[in-house]
Amino acid sequence: MKILITGICGFAGSVITRGLLEHLPGVQITGIDSLIRNGSETNLEPLRALGIDVRVGDIRNEQDLADLPAVNWVLDCAANPSVLAGVDGQTSAKELLDHNLGGTIHLLEYCRKHKAGFILLSTSRVYSIPPLASLSVEVHQGAYRPVFDNPSPCISQRGLMESFSTEPPISLYGSSKKCSELLALEYGMTFDFPVRINRCGVLAGAGQFGKADQGIFSFWIHSWARRRPLKYIGFGGGGYQVRDCLHPRDIVPLLIAQMGGPERKVDPILNVSGGVESAMSLAKLSDWCSDRLGSHQVAADANPRPFDIPWMVLDSSAANEAWGWKPQTQMPTLLEEIAQHAEQHPGWLELVS
């Protein structure tokens, strides 16, 4: 099997690449990365040393894709993954859409040309913000949990299901990924190639280029270890907001199943997430950091941040039913992995900031 991985030098792309090499004998991987994300350059030569043909290029540039060899599958891990992208003053809305949506269009044209299957790593942020922002919650053991007055077929204590609303507003970032999903499905049906869309929650693990608006688990632990300033933002400044997390290596078995064998009649859109078992609030993460790394003071800022929501957990039951998939890395293992990386790389935040 021949696979093209975009964003291969990013955290998710590099981890998934190593997992595919380990578990898919005979696989031939070509990668492309623009290296615009600070820290991604550290993965370039190690991946090449594994025999990966890694090209420094940009999926927004059609010629960079035209120079790539034909493959059986394209795994799209390239994106600006920040929900604040386009409004944070660091990137413009046009730059965001050009990167996340324009790049996807070029990849879909590549798939059309070569009849390659397409797998998009999408995001939980395609789900509608207003119903999530207004979700009735209560504080339970230092974390928000939803309170449901009426049962819903699309959200429960186990998380959001794929049927949850994706109506705007979902942020410019979320819109760029939702549009990419729709175009991928249209291209696949029109030009007859398989398409899989995996909506991921927060990805986390050692070596992640964590920031406050993306990769929060890694950012928090590394910042705590260095005694850098940390702040609970919004929702009264209590740090009760909850997210689930997933190690990208846990996605590898699902990808292998999705790329292997004949086409299967299953829903192409799936939540792929750690679920309630790996969900944690910032306040509880701080408790873990205090026990593991020592005490540190966290400030509070009650002012809300754009697009923030109190509770975001995905229910991945459909992925289990369709492909027999479920995450393997438990939360304590994942957090300990990040903590050890923080201790071994004290300058990591400076490298990736």
Image (cartoon, helix red, strand yellow):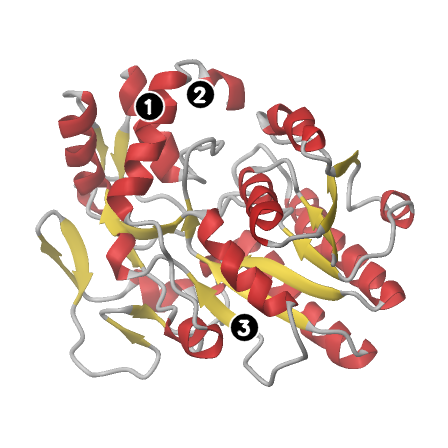
- What type is the residue that disc 3 sits on? Ile
Residue drawn at (56%, 34%) of the image? 89
Element type at mark 3: strand
Would residue 285 be found to the left or right of residue 37 on screen? Answer: left
> Where is mark 3, residue-wise?
269
Element type at mark 2: helix
- Name the residue at the front extreme: 25
Quarter of the image where one finds residue 74: bottom right
Q: Which numbered disc, 2 or 1, marks the residue that appears first in the sequence?
A: 1
> Where is mark 2, residue-wise?
349
Give coordinates of residue 284: x percent, y percent.
17, 41
Q: CA distance from mark 1 to mark 3?
A: 35 Å
Give coordinates of residue 195: x percent, y percent.
67, 71
Neighbours of disc 3 within 10 Å: few (<14), some (14-19), many (20+): some
Residue drawn at (28%, 82%) of the image? 152
> Where is mark 1, residue-wise?
223
Question: 212 or 114, which lies in front?
Answer: 114
Q: CA distance from mark 2 to mark 1?
A: 8 Å
Residue drawn at (69%, 43%) of the image? 95
Q: CA distance from mark 3 to mark 2?
A: 34 Å
